[in-house]
Image (cartoon, grey):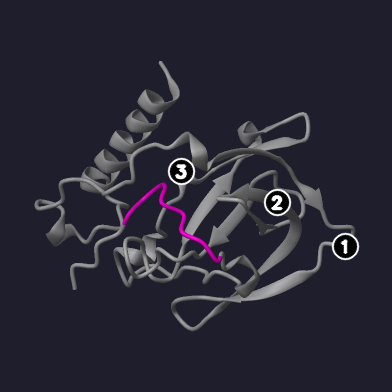
Amino acid sequence: MDYAERLQRERAEKDEYFAEHPRSPIPTGDRDGFDGLDYYDPDPEYRFELELHEFDDHDTIQVDTTQDGEQTYYRWGEFEFELDGDTHTLTAYRRDPGEKQLWVPFTDETNGDTTYPAGRYLDLDEDAERDGVWLLDFNRAYSPFCAYSDAYECPLVPFENHLDTRIEAGERYENTE
């Protein structure tokens, strides 16, 4: 199975989860009319194999949430990549120093246009890392659960992860309110 087919299968599984699972962020009354999420077509230009430039000190930051709360994250490291001739950086975070997963939230110039206004997330688990090189794949960018229901509290994207470009990859969002 090639990359695009694997990505399409993952998206179909997510759509099934959103349509049927009791913990779906789609409100129960809206699930009958749910016919799947909207996505950009897979684009290999938005897949990057990158080294994580780990910070010497893993400072903590307080991240505001959609429910007026705060969550603590460790600033773990930084990815640097080139897109359309420009260099961009994104900070990767961890909830706990002992965990392996990296959380890479971001906003870009598609927010409020074709993607969720508050930004999107990438979760990089240990399978995304090989020999110090991480796969940062914006085709897997997703809107947080709070995009679909006020019942969820989601961390907002820290200012340092606001990209000054369009990331036309991953999950799209149509606000139906």
- Mark 3 crowd level (few <14, some 14–19, many ≥20, 10 Å Cα): many
Q: Please identify, in this view, whether the residue under mark 1 or under mark 3 is nearer the observer.
A: 3
Tell me where residue 78 sits by quadrant: bottom right
| Mark identifier at residue 140 | 3
Which residue appears at 22% of the width and 44% of the height?
20
Tag count:
3
Residue kind at label 2, given as amino acid type = Phe
Chief secondary structure of the magenta portion: loop
Q: Which image quadrant: the N terminus?
A: top left
Tell me where residue 50 sits by quadrant: top right
Residue kind at label 3, given as amino acid type = Arg
Residue 132: give x, y in percent of width and height. Answer: 78, 35
Indicate yes or no whether the magenta region holds residue 168.
Answer: yes
Q: Tell which circle, 3 or 2, labels the residue nearer the N-terminal end.
A: 2
Observer-nearest residue: 144 or 109? 109
| Mark identifier at residue 79 | 2
Indicate yes or no whether the magenta region holds residue 116.
Answer: no
Which residue appears at 18% of the width and 58% of the height?
28
